[in-house]
Amino acid sequence: MKILALDSSGLVASAAIAEDDNLLAEYTVNYKKTHSQTLLPMIQEICRMTEQDLHTIDGIAVAAGPGSFTGLRIGSATAKGLGLALDKPLIHIPTVDALAYNLYGCGDLICPMMDARRNQVYTGIYQFEGDELKILTGQAPKGVEELAEELNVLGRAVVFLGDGVPVYRKLLEEKLSVPHRYAPAHANKQRAACVAVLGLRYMREGRIETAADHRPDYLRPSQAERERQERERREQEHAGH
């Protein structure tokens, strides 16, 4: 089984091709956020380097959120376009789950943190039991202090990763009472390889969707939507006076 995987949910853009237990290619760039310009050329390059015909893939796995609204839209639109053009199913991978999968085999709690601004992160709490990634707390937007409190209550050592770590590390150090570490550079950001491996697993389990049905998981309204809601609320209050 062969999977094309994409992740443009955050600062990193990443594309990979995996076939069964082989990672054939991965192209990951963490430099400025111009995913709209880079994602398709990255896919073309890994196909060229590995002499792949995209018609031979079985499915397209995409990091489907949460994350940057623009990044998620680009990843989803690319996956949907390819899925429709190639007539291939999509595999919807939760972004935070894929991030946690970077630390396969880790014995401690795993806590990915994606910066969601305003002292919030997209996060979840995970642990490995054998080969299985167990979700203790599903992915959701959460205040950093609330997250630290939750981890303190669990009372177990934890490893953090994700682009929220450098932003909130000082706050974590202040609030955490449990032993904690930070994943090193090769394992601390989104990687399409993790999306691909989870994609292979999900596809074997029949957890697929059509390209037409695919929708990203934003988990909260965009800034534009929040501003619109706030404006409408003010207008209603004004009209009521």
Image (cartoon, helix red, strand yellow):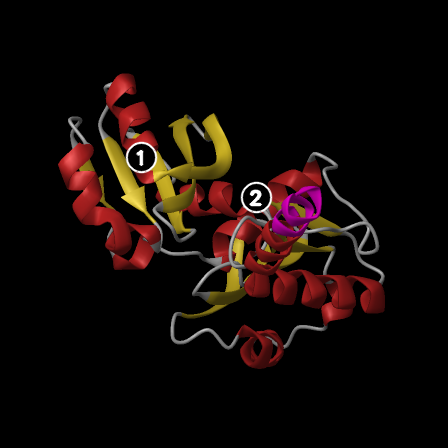
- Number of other residues with Cα within 10 Å of mark 2, as a class: few under 14, some 14 to 19, many 20 or more: many
Give the label, 2 or 1, closer to the camera.
Answer: 2
Q: Amino acid at mark 2?
A: Pro
Give the tally of numbered discs. Answer: 2
> Which of the labelled discs sits on residue 94, or is there none?
2
Residue at screen point 64% across, 49% down: 238
Asked if residue 237 is among those painted magenta in the image, a careful observer would answer yes
Residue 67 makes an appearance in the image = yes
Q: Nearer the viewer, residue 10 or 148?
A: 148
Seen in the picture, residue 75 relative to 199 is either above or below; the reply is below
Q: Amino acid at mark 1?
A: Cys
Q: Is residue 111 left or right of residue 42?
A: left
Q: Is residue 69 left or right of residue 177?
A: right
Image x and y of residue 182, in percent: 22, 46
Q: Are marks 2 and 1 in contact (CB under 8 Å)?
A: no
What residue sits right under mark 1 in the picture? Answer: 106
Q: Nearer the viewer, residue 79 or 49?
A: 79
Magenta residue span: 233-241
Main secondary structure along the magenta-highlighted residues: helix
Q: The C terminus is located in which quarter? A: top right
Image x and y of residue 162, in percent: 35, 51
Seen in the picture, residue 38 relative to 236 is either above or below; the reply is below
Residue at screen point 27% across, 31% down: 148
Residue 21 makes an appearance in the image = no
> Which of the labelled discs sits on residue 134, or is there none?
none
Image x and y of residue 205, in percent: 70, 34
Separation of marks 2 and 1 at Cα, in angstroms:
19 Å
- Pick whichever of labels 2 and 1 is earlier in the sequence: 2
Asked if residue 104 is among those painted magenta in the image, a careful observer would answer no
Residue at screen point 26% across, 38% down: 159
